Structures are given as structure tokens and as C-alpha cells.
Amino acid sequence: FTYYLEGAQQTKEQRMRDIPEDIMREMRGDVDLLFEKFDIDGSKTIEADELVKAMRSMGYDAIDEAQATRMIAQVPGGVKVQGKMDRDEFQRFMEPIIVEKLLAEEDRIEEFRNMFKEADTDYSGYLSANEIYAVLLKEGIDLNFEDLVELIHEFDEDANAQLDIDEFVTMMN
């Protein structure tokens, strides 16, 4: 789901509308796979206990069955079977959640790109170990210089002892 917006800042609604159809199609396919995975009883519906497991797999650990039941009841449209969602309802339920995660990931990548640009004080297009060390300290990440050199080595694809913007974003992510 990696997607990069170019140009001026857009509202969240604009950003959601502007997600290319191929990415939306891929996302819907992923939601279908998620539906299959969490339809544990094979009923072709997702029940509250199955929704809890699906949401927890996506990092929403605080959800319980009562909340899941309320969430299912709020899904618009479709044939309502009390306490269950069919595939279409699950799609409508999950799409905004996944899009939100997609946009948050995009924002985080943009933050890392901005960190890189700010740290590239010599405008070389690469960050030296000292520049990376300064970024990490500024972000509250304290590691010794030897560990930093190992970290750089792990993400330095072209083995030039520096990180370009893509290598830096990968490391920070």
C-alpha cells in the first residue's frame, strides 16, 4: 500500500478521493483475503469475535466483542443479519480504516523525507553517519556510534557508507 502524493498539501478528503483506482483495487483484494482469513467458521459472514481478531491483526488491540458488535451494527447498507457482516459489508467497513492507515503511512514517509532534507546540510543528496546521528538524537533515539555504523551498513544498498533519501526512509520506517 505504499503511495506517495505529489504537489501541494491536500485535505484528507481530497487525498482519499485521489487514491488511484489500481491501489484501491489492490486494497479491496487485500480486504477480501482478510475476510477469508477471519471468517473462521466458514459462514461467509464476519461475526463480532471474528471482527475482534481481524482488528487486532491490524493493530487495534483495545477492541472487545461489545465494541465489535456496535461497529457491525453501524455498517451502512447490505442485508443486515444481527451481529454479522457479509463480504460487501466487511468491504464497506474496512475500506475507510485501511485508507486511514494508508494516509498515515504516507504522512510518516513524508516526515522522514523532510527529516532527510533538513539533515542534508551539505545538499549532497546523502547523509553521512554524523548527519544521521544528529537526526536520531533530535528524534530522541540514542544509540552509540558503533551501532549507528552497523545500522547504516544494513540499509546502505550501494555500499557508499552514506544513505540516500530512499535508504534513509527505509531505515526510519
Image (tube, rainbow, N blue to C red):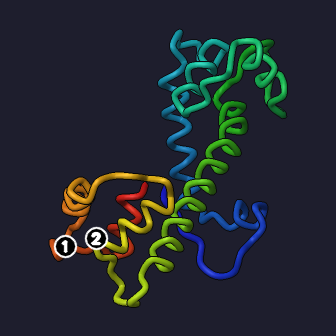
Residue 55 against residue 109 in the figure, above or below: above
Q: Which callout, 1 or 2, points at the residue further toward the start of the chain?
A: 2
Q: Are marks 1 and 2 in contact (CB under 8 Å)?
A: yes
Which residue occupies 33% across, 76% down? 127
Pointer 1: residues within 10 angstroms few (<14), some, or many (20+)?
some
Question: Secondary structure beneath disc 2?
Answer: helix
Q: Which mark is residue 87?
A: none
Relative placement, left or right, of 170 versus 84 is left
Which residue occupies 53% across, 9% down? 41
Question: Secondary structure beneath disc 1?
Answer: loop
Looking at the image, which is closer to me, 55 or 36? 55
Looking at the image, which is closer to me, 10 or 141? 141
Three-letter amino acid code at the position of disc 2: Ala
Q: Which mark is residue 129?
A: 2
Q: How many marks?
A: 2
Three-letter amino acid code at the position of disc 1: Ala
Residue 13 against residue 101 in the figure, above or below: below
Identity of the residue furthest to the left in this view: 159
Question: Could you tell me residue 108's position as x and y percent?
Answer: 55, 59
Q: Quadrant of the C terminus?
A: bottom left
Question: Could you tell me residue 76's position as x and y percent?
Answer: 84, 34
Would you identify the image quadrant in which residue 121 lies? bottom left
Which residue occupies 45% across, 74% down? 116
Identity of the residue furthest to the bottom in this view: 123
Q: Which mark is residue 161?
A: 1
Identity of the residue furthest to the top in this view: 41
- What is the distance, in whole Å, between disc 1 and disc 2 at their CAs? 8 Å
Labels 1, 2: front one: 2
Question: Could you tell me residue 43's position as x and y percent?
Answer: 58, 12
